[in-house]
Structures are given as C-alpha cells and as structure tokens.
Image (cartoon, rainbow, N blue to C red):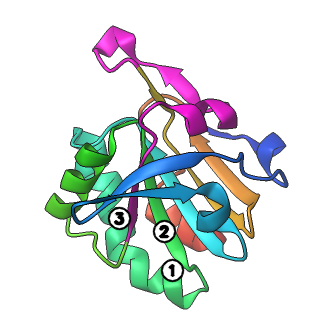
Amino acid sequence: MSESRFTSKEGQKIPSVSFQCREGDAWVTKTTEALFSGKNVVVFSLPGAFTPTCTGEHLPGYVRQSEEMRKKGVEEIICLSVNDPFVMDAWGKTQVVEGKVLMVGDGTGRFSRAMGLETDLRTVGFGLRSKRYAMIVDDGVISHLNVEVGLGLETSDASTIFNLL
C-alpha cells in the first residue's frame, strides 16, 4: 500500500499564514487564525486545480460528503492547492462547491512549505506544489494528518477522513 501517515505533525499548531481569496469580485485576506481558531476543520490539499484525480475524485468526494461531515461537527471544509485565487475560484464554480467547500489558493506555496508538505513536480510541468493530504484540525491544532505517497488517492479521500471524525 502506498500510504503514509505523518503523525509527527499531529498535535502541532497550524502555521500562521495569510491567504488571498476571492469572494465574488472582491479580494479577501484570510488568516489561518481566522480559518482555524475555535473550529473543527477538515483540510484537504492537492497538487492542482482542474487536474484529473483532483477534479474527478478528490474534490467531488468532499463536496458529496460535506453535509455528513458537518453533522459530525465539522464547521469548515477547506480545499487547498498551490494555485492562485482566480483559479481556485473558477474551479470551485465548475465543481459547485458553494456552501460546501471553501476554496483556498496557496498561490506562493507558503503554507505548504511551512507544513513541510511541498513537493517538486517540475518533471511533469507543474513546478513546486503541495503533496496530496488531508487533515483534521481542532482549534488550530492538527489532530489527524494523512499524507499520500505519490499522486494517488488512498488516505486523503473524503471517506477515509469521514471515518476519522
């Protein structure tokens, strides 16, 4: 099985980072403190918007299971990718995520680097991106972190994270 759990990060606080997001036609700055403090949050990160696995399986799974996750106490579901806010906004619209998944672009990769979860995908034309992972964050502290080895989708999918809630 090609999975890995980076438990060394479990119990650690989320890095302090700001993200530029789009809300309608407006720029909005969202900090990790505002996104995570006092909340139960599920975050899943992926290598890129509009890519086959990310668009066909990863994001749609969280959209489908968003209501069930909220019934288990999840207050926010965040999709994170090293893409700019315009791309994340457009991708979210095509995937009909409104009210289900918050699309957050880590355009500079700052959060991914701070988490130690960046990956070099230059050999496939992507550049530096985020590894595929999912985590449960309680009041800014990581309680579960599942990181995929490679580009597969075995441990960061919505069903696996749902079962950890």
Specify which label sits upstream in the sequence, 3 or 2: 3
Q: Which mark is residue 77?
A: 2
- Whole-percent x and y of residue 129? 44, 28
Residue 23, quarter of the rendered image: bottom left
**Residue drawn at (59%, 65%) of the image:** 35
Specify which label sits upstream in the sequence, 1 or 3: 3
**Residue drawn at (40%, 65%) of the image:** 102
- Between the residue at mark 1 and the residue at mark 3, the CA separation in whole angstroms equals 11 Å
Range shown magenta: 101-127
Q: Amino acid at mark 2?
A: Ile
In the image: residue 159, left or right of residue 23: right
User: Which residue matches tag 3?
Assistant: 61
- Closest to the observer, 48 or 159: 48
- Between the residue at mark 1 and the residue at mark 2, the CA separation in whole angstroms equals 9 Å
Q: Nearer the viewer, mark 3 or mark 2?
A: 2
Specify which label sits upstream in the sequence, 1 or 2: 1
Q: Which mark is residue 69?
A: 1
Is label 3 in contact with label 2 (beta carbons under 8 Å)? no
Is label 1 in contact with label 2 (beta carbons under 8 Å)? yes
- Whole-percent x and y of residue 164? 65, 69
Can residue 165 be seen here? The reply is no
Q: Amino acid at mark 3?
A: Gly
- Whole-percent x and y of residue 6? 73, 40
